[in-house]
Structures are given as C-alpha cells and as structure tokens.
Image (cartoon, rainbow, N blue to C red):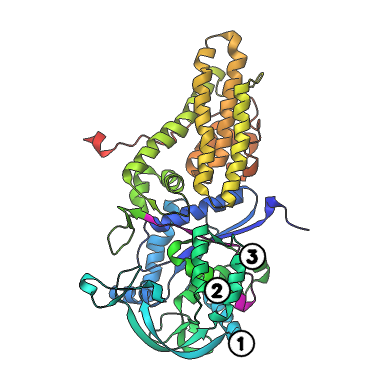
Amino acid sequence: MPESSENKSFFITTPIFYVNDAPHIGHAYTEVATDVLARWHRQSGDDTWFLTGTDEHGQKILRTATANGVAPKEWADRLVESAWRPLLNTINISNDDFIRTTDARHEEGVAKFLQKLYDDGHVYAGEFEALYCVGCEEFKPKSEIVDGTGAFEGEKVCAIHSKPLELLQEKNYFFKMSAFQDRLLALYEERPDFVQPASARNEVIAFVQQGLEDLSISRTSFDWGIPIPWDSSHVTYVWFDALLNYVTATGYGSNDEQFARRWPATHIVGKDILRFHAVIWPAMLMAAGLPVPEHVFAHGWLLVGGEKMSKSKLTGIAPNEITDTFGSDAFRYYFMRAISFGQDGSFSWEDLAARYQAELANGFGNLASRVLAMNAKYFGSVQPAAAEETAADQAIRELALKVTSAADTHIERFAIHEAIAEIWQLVDALNGYITEQEPWVLAKSEEQKPRLGTVLATATEGLRALAELLHPVVPEATAKLWAALGADEAIGALDEQPLRDAGTWGRLPAGTPQQPLAVLFPRIETDAESK
C-alpha cells in the first residue's frame, strides 16, 4: 500500500562541518534552513529525520590540532563540546541525530562500504601526483587552479582559498568514478529536480560533461583517518569518509530496517561543496548498489561587506553575536526571509535591526498583543464567539487557506523565503483588517457587540493559524502565542498541529480561556538611542 502524502518519509541533512575552528553564521544559516524544512515536514505528519554532525578526520584537522599542541581526537572532542553542539541550542535546532566521523558506528560503516566497493571491482591501486588544497581537502581540478598574486606570485593557488597548492605524490587507491559518467548524466536528465536550484544543476552537468577522472580515495602521507580495511597503511580520503555519514548514521551495514525507513535523503549543502554531493556521492552510491539521494540543494553564500565569510579574512561572525541581542527567533527569521534561498545574500546589522523592528516587533508581535489585549478588555480574556460573517471576515478566512497551501508548495521546492513571504500576507492582512474594522469603536455600542465578537474571533483565529504556520521559523515566539491563546488546552500541543491544515477555519473554540501574552519581540535599543 503506497504511503499517503501525510506520512511520507522525509530524511534531511546538513553537511557535516569541519571541527578545525568554531562555527560562524554561514554554518548557522545552513543549520537553520535545514531545521525549518525539517520542522515543517515533521509538523505536517511526515516521517521526518534530521541529521547534522561533524567531520573530524583529514590533514586540515591534524594540522590544526598539532598547531594547538593536542592530539586530533582531543581537539575534535574539545571543539564539538565547546562550539558545535552548543551552536544547535543557540539557534534552536531540532535535529534527531548528531553524527561524528569518529563515532564507532561511522567507522564500521565506512569500512563495510569500502570493502564492498573493493570486492566488486570498483577500486584499484595506482600512483598519483597532483596539486592539493588542504583547505578544501581536495586535489584541485584545473578549473580551480589559478596563478597567485602578491606574496604568492609565481605559485599555483586554490581559486576558493587563494592559498598555495601543495604538489603531492602518493601511491593511492582509486575509485573508478569515470565509469559512472554516463549514468550520472542520465540521472540529471531523468530527474531534473535532483540537483537544485537550476543554476547548480547546470554547473554540475557542465562539469561532468567535461569528463570524469577516477578519484583517489586513500592517503599514506598522514594517519589521521579511517584505515582502508584491506590495507591499514592507507587511511580513507576525508571526503569519501565524510560523505558516508549520511548512510552510516541511518543504519547502513548495521540496521537494515532503519536504513530502509530513512534512506534516501535530501541534502542541503553550500554551493562550494556541491560537486562532492552531486557527482562523487551519487557515483559512490551507484557503485554500492544503493539508491541515490532524493535531492541535493545548494544554497548560496552569506556575504559580509561583499565578501564570503571567512575565518582567515576575519569576516566570520559568531551566531551568538546576533542571538545575544536579538534572540534565536529573530536570527532564524532574518536569514530565512531576507535571503532568497539558493542565491548569495548579504548580511548587514542595519537590515537585521530594521526587519526586527518593522516585521517582527511591529508587524507580528504588535498584532498578537493588540488582539489579545482587546479580547481581555472586551470579552474577559476568552475567545469571542463569531456572529454573521461579512466579506471582510471571509477574505481573511480565504487568505489563511490560500497562504497555507501556497507556503507548503514553496517549502516542497525549498523556497523558504517565498513560503515566509506568503505567510506574511496574513500578518499584513490582519493588521489592515483591524485598522479597517475599528473594534475599539464597535466596543462603544452594545448593539455592535456581536460584530465586535466576529471581528476579534476572526483576528484571533488568524493568530492561531499564524502560530502554526510560523512555528517552524520562530518556534519560541509562536509557543508563547499558542500558550496565550489557550490553544494547548483547547486543541493540543502546537508542534502536533497538522501544518497543512493550518488554514482550516474555526479550530479555536469560542469561550476558550486566554492567558496574558509574554512580549514576543522586546524593544532593542540601538547604539544611537543609547547615547
């Protein structure tokens, strides 16, 4: 029996992040986007699993640990516990699992996967000499090798990191990736939505059409990695190891039932690691006889002052620099609303502060506070009963239904920014509705009491719909609103409400007792105001 759309499997992942340094808002951006998608699907009743984690092997980690005078595992443990796990709390991430490439389950799964590829003839030994970027942990293709300038004049440098490349010569094991070129091109053709957005798909197709080379999958020049199972003098290439986290975390080689339930996944990645996920990874899976991912979605870069954020260029901003002032909800809302998901976007403190004030505090927060204050004043803090409906009330009801359906459609195609813009139409419409209906004027006449009840019932039901629709984006504020509406007792926990039914009208019963509303988005003093 086929699964219904209400309970389909939805497995979504972030990349696993290098533990060579602490996270910045670029990492947090990926986490939040993936979290919003996971929360939306989970609240819609889909069988959702959200995986994130850390990448802890390879030369870059080894060098960073050595520079800090500790063993690489000790360095990884320190960074995971002091920076990477706390990040998830800082920005309110609802991940179901956290994988580390030093976990026993991962190392065992990688060994099984490698042995299968070797046994099936997809791996061979060979000599190799090429230019290597430690920052990318990759032998660079010609398209990403450029001539150095300034201090690096006369040297070949990485186009991404602008640092000199190292000429490495090793005897390595190779994965016969070139054998999968035609199958990959057929995949992109047959499933146009496999790689998204379209610009990313075009880039991947162009890269594969140029011809694929076999991939070096082992290293002998250092020992910080997972040993090759048939030759312990080699360790596994860090990307080959890292990509496998998506299957080792979900039971590959250890829990067939769990693996069948979860796999395949949807991968959210930054565009700089697109090629690994859209070319190397599906080729690896094809070789192992496993299904390829559902989707690979490459988002753009966060730009600060026109440049991609970078620790080495001191343009990295720690997430708590924002959340300490504005809170996690504002962080989540701003990056999901202000940037078209899939394109580069610029961050500025001025834009963040302006959107916080205009859209969150004055738009959504003030709407909730006004409606609940009028319910308290005119109806003794209970949900009013609606009387005869007018065209204005009907328009709100119809809009709630429309934006719910449209937002869900946008989420299905990863257009998070468009989904929020759609929902925000209801925020704006309700603010306009209250201004036009003037409930404070209606309250002066006893004859108008039924009309007053209808207006405030409509506005309050609109808030109920908004609490459900915005919960994946601003979970703290919507939880406060849900509690104030008395909805927990009346219709159940917020995160258990079927999100695709949020636009169904009249779910909050008349007479439901309401509570005082905690301030959703407190006033924040700017530097100018505090002087």
Q: Is residue 346 above or below residue 296?
A: above
- Mark 3 Cα-neighbour bin, 10 Å: few <14, some 14–19, many ≥20: few
Give, as a three-letter code, the residue at label 2: Arg
Specify the quadrant of the image occupied by residue 446. top right
In this rendering, the label closer to the viewer, 3 or 1: 3
Name the amino acid type tagged 1: Asp
Q: Would you name the residue on which mark 2 appears? A: 105
Q: Could you tell me if residue 404 is visible in this image?
A: yes
The percent position of residue 74, horizontal first and vertical second, equals 38, 73
Q: Amino acid at mark 3?
A: Glu
Q: Residues within 10 Å of mark 1 (few under 14, many from 20)?
A: few
Q: Secondary structure at mark 3?
A: helix
Residue picked out by circle 1: 119
- Indicate the quadrant containing the C terminus: top left, top right, bottom left or bottom right: top left
Front residue (pair 465, 481)? 465
Earlier along the polypeptide chain: callout 1 or callout 2? 2
Whichever of callouts 2 and 3 sits on the residue coming sooner in the sequence is 2
Distance from label 2 to label 3 (Cα)?
Answer: 34 Å
Could you give the CA–CA distance between mark 3 and mark 1, rounded to whole angstroms? 30 Å
* Marking on residue 190: 3
Report if the CB atoms under discs 1 and 2 are less than 8 Å apart.
no
Magenta part of the chain: 286-302
- The residue positioned 44% from the left and 47% from the top of the image is 332
Going from the N terminus, do you reach mark 3 or mark 1 first? Answer: 1
Q: Position of residue 329 (x, y in %)?
A: 44, 44
